[in-house]
Image: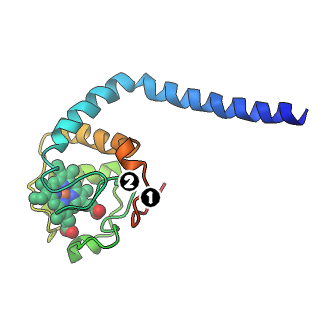
């Protein structure tokens, strides 16, 4: 009976995985289009940012959900460090539309993305990319809030 119970647990875990994957698949078509468009838009950010490492700007793995200014060792502006923003998708949407309006004094020298659809696709990309291989290695200094 014991091993049967364990098998049930394994089955339950597998089932929830399948459901989870099916979930992703459901809007997969939409997300995929958004992801691919977002990846192209991200090329504008790649002048300064990368997913898995800090460059002129801080790394973006784990961005959705983390506190602004929280990558240890990255030389943020005081404005960003003190902003107390949590990068929810809604806050990213506001910031990316007009960085200087949302964080006056930020050292991010980028004027923002004015097109609502482009920002939506870019944020979908940032969210999904965090699950990709470039973000699977634990990067010291990142704090992932879930
Ligand atoms: C010219 C260089 C540059 C470009 C282009 C740029 N960034 Fe940045 N970004 C920075 C810098 C520098 C910071 C740190 C800002 C600060 O400390 O005030 C930053 C900070 C950020 C943050 C806050 C991260 C954190 O850890 O709190 C986000 C989010 C962000 N950038 C997203 C983007 C996205 C998305 C794009 C593309 C649309 C982009 N950036 C384009 C330089 C850039």
Local secondary structure at mark 1 = loop
- Image vertical order of residue 46 relative to residue 142, above or below: above
- The location of residue 139, given as percent across then percent down, is 39, 59
Q: CA distance from mark 2 to mark 1?
A: 6 Å
Does residue 95 show up?
no
Judging depth in this view, the residue of 1 and 94 nearest the camera is: 1
Locate the N terminus and report the quarter of the image it occupies: top right
In the rendered picture of this protein, how many numbered marks are placed on residues? 2
Judging depth in this view, the residue of 123 and 17 nearest the camera is: 17
Q: Is residue 100 left or right of residue 1?
A: left
Q: Is residue 28 left or right of residue 106?
A: right
Q: Quadrant of residue 63?
A: bottom left
Q: Quadrant of residue 119?
A: top left
Local secondary structure at mark 2 = loop
Residue shown at the point (64%, 30%) measured from the top left: 14
For label 2, the residue is 62
Q: Residues within 10 Å of mark 2 (few under 14, many from 20)?
A: many
For label 1, the residue is 144
- The location of residue 13, given as percent across then percent down, is 66, 34
Disc number for residue 10: none
Does residue 50 show up?
yes
Residue shown at the point (9%, 61%) measured from the top left: 109
- The location of residue 126, given as percent across then percent down, is 30, 45
């Amino acid at each position: 009976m014991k091993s049967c119970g364990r098998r049930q647990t394994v089955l339950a875990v597998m089932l929830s995985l399948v459901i989870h994957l099916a979930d992703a698949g459901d809007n997969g078509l939409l997300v995929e289009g958004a992801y691919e468009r977002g990846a192209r838009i991200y090329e504008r950010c790649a002048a300064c940012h990368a997913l898995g490492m800090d460059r002129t700007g801080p790394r973006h793995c784990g961005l959705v959900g983390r506190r602004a200014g929280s990558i240890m060792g990255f030389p943020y502006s005081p404005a960003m460090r003190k902003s107390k923003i949590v990068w929810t998708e809604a806050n990213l949407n506001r910031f990316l539309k007009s960085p200087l309006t949302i964080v006056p004094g930020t050292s991010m020298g980028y004027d923002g993305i004015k097109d609502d659809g482009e920002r939506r696709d870019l944020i979908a990309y940032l969210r999904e990319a965090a699950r990709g291989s470039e973000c699977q290695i634990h990067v010291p200094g990142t704090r992932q809030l879930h």
